[in-house]
Image (cartoon, coloured by chain):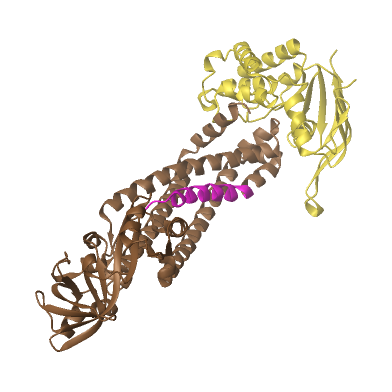
Amino acid sequence: MTAFWPVLVLKMLARRARRAAIMMAATAMAVACLVVLDAIMEGVGDAMIRNSVAAAGGHVTLTPTAAHAADETVAATVRRWSGVSEALPRRTQAAMLTAGRSSAAVTLVGVVPAERNWSVVAAKIIRGGFPRGGGAILIGSDLADRLGAAVGDPVQAAAADGTGRTFTVCGVFRTHLPHLDAQLALADLDDVAPAQQSVNIFLADPYAAPATAARAAGELAVLATQWQNDLPELAGLIALNRFSMNVVLGLALLILAFGISNNVFQGVSQRRRELSILRAMGLTGRGVMAIVLGETMLMAAVAAVIGAAVGIAATLLWARWGLDLSPWTSGNPHFLISAVVYPRLTGGGVIAPMAVACACGFLAALAPARRAGRSTITQGLRML
Amino acid sequence: MSILELKNVSRIFGSGPARCPALRGIDLSIEPAEMLAVTGASGSGKSTLLNICAGLDAPTGGSVLLDGRDMRGMSADAMAHLRRAAIGFVFQFMNLLPALTAWENIELALVLSGAPRDDRRRRVASLLDLAGLAEKARALPDQLSGGQQQRLAVLRALAHRPRIVFMDEPTSCLDSDHARDLMDLVVNLNAWEKTTIVVATHDAAVAGRMTARVQMRDGKIISPEVTP
């Protein structure tokens, strides 16, 4: 193909600069909105996962199966894996806590100090602090009320195997989740017997959990579960959220395609004489179609790139401050620690709107282009 | 052998009560390098005849043979290829492409005919020089006078060295001086390039520059006249 045709297309576009600019602006705006909306959707999902796994047990939970696979050894191994932000060993024990004449059945969890950076409990301490060994214990507010225990008070812990020890309440947390506030107690890892060990893994990319779980199951003597299995309602909610957003995106693209088609139809009608001259000079109907499609695709492609750039810039700016959803998330267990959503760009979230905008441009221009290629030359030439 | 031959060509627009016969049983033969004037009043069918001869419109009946090839039944693509290779057309209202410069308007015809880039450059430069438009090569059509635009339209029609060029009222928008200049250009190009020229006109001065004339009335040729 000679370079003449792209020049011709560009010059024809330049002659209708205002119309072209309007169409490109509309397309660019749609692409930018779609990029930002997709990033928000990802951000909401991330926030829900972040909050939920903090209340549960990380993105992946490993349970060592072999006696030699001690929790801290496994955690140290996994921590070196790419994509792993943290691997926290835990020891869990069913126990009876007693203070004075009151007692309650609890889940006593032994944790390492780094847990305070990841656990929902650490973020919800209302009195005292996080346990740092030496028999310190952090308990839920409902449990504290039931035991009548305050920070500094001693409590007796009796395990199911008959062993027991005395802890000192170092802090009280309140998550507003009844099962945590009434039944959970945290102590230092070394203060809890290694009856039931686990390693809780936090990942940079929560959606890498299945791959990480599979790797752990393959390379280590562990049972591995990912958050999608441990929190099926959360996985379902995110899938529903994504579906709803895709419906909205589809409708937005439909409107965009209609707008492009209308614009191209008008452009072709106004340039019927111009296109008829080309046909009179020997350009085939397919050639005319190619010009109309080429123009539209060029506009759509440039607009898509501009729109994606604007969308990326807006998302990155927004992600610096985050989007606080707390007025709409009170009492929502999926936003327990923080309701601030940080929009997150994904390759698909940027490329898909660009590709779909180009596809919309192509499909929307197809009918006007066919019409231009099939119109009668002599009628077109008579148009002034 | 005739370059163009029309046999019993008719063209009817509309149907039923709106039926309007524009051409009625036209027989015409045009020889290579001939300059033919088609004269007649407005509505006599001159433009319709030229459109059909140039393959821009299809006849309702009869046949049109260009270099012995019957254009009837040719596909749209085949007609397009024929137009780009063998036919040139000068429209009444110039019909230059407003987005392209004078140079590019001429080059377009050469691009369509598949001429190599260097040949295109040489041809466009020589044609613009010939028509005294070399300094206007980069000008857009709306930056040219009516006479310059019409000369440009003639250059574009002749650029790809077609076998035959049709001109529909080429001087209708020009004053007599510019009309004379244009016809000088046409006659010179015919002499140099041996291109067959068919001009539809109601201007007796233009018709007088041609070597042959046919007069039309009500869609029929009523008086052929040939100047040796």
Q: In which quarter of the image is residue B215?
A: top right
Q: Nearer the viewer, residue A360 or B222?
A: A360
Could you say where residue B69 lies in the image, as x and y percent from the top left?
87, 29
Query: Which chain wears yellow?
Result: B
Residue A147: quarter of image: bottom left
Instruction: Please state which of residues A134 and B49 is positioned toward the viewer in this rendering.
Output: A134
Which residue is depicted at the point 42% across and 46% down? A307
Is residue A346 rendered magenta in the image? yes
Q: Position of residue A44 (x, y in %)?
A: 36, 62
Chain displayed in brown: A
Quadrant of the image containing the C terminus of chain B: top right
In this picture, which residue range is highlighted in magenta? Answer: A344-367
* Dominant secondary structure (helix, strand or loop) of the stretch shown in magenta: helix
Image label count = 0
Which residue reaches farthest bottom?
Answer: A101
**Residue located 62% across and 16% down the image:** B124
Residue at x 12%, y 86% (from the top left corner): A100
Judge whether residue A39 can be spotted in this image: yes
Residue nearest the observer in this picture, A283 or A117: A117
Residue A212 falls left or right of residue B220: left
Q: Where is residue B94 in the image (x, y as percent from the top left)?
A: 63, 28
Left or right for B51, reference A129: right
Q: Which of A219 and A299 is in front in this view?
A: A219
Residue A57 visible: no
Q: Where is residue A75 in the image (x, y as percent from the top left)?
A: 33, 57
Q: Is residue B25 left or right of residue A345?
A: right
Instruction: Note whether B199 is above or below A167 in the view shown.
Output: above
In this view, the residue farthest toward the left is: A152
Assign the N terminus of chain B to one quadrant of the image.
top right
Quick check: is A131 in the magenta stretch? Answer: no
Q: In which quarter of the image is residue A61?
A: bottom left
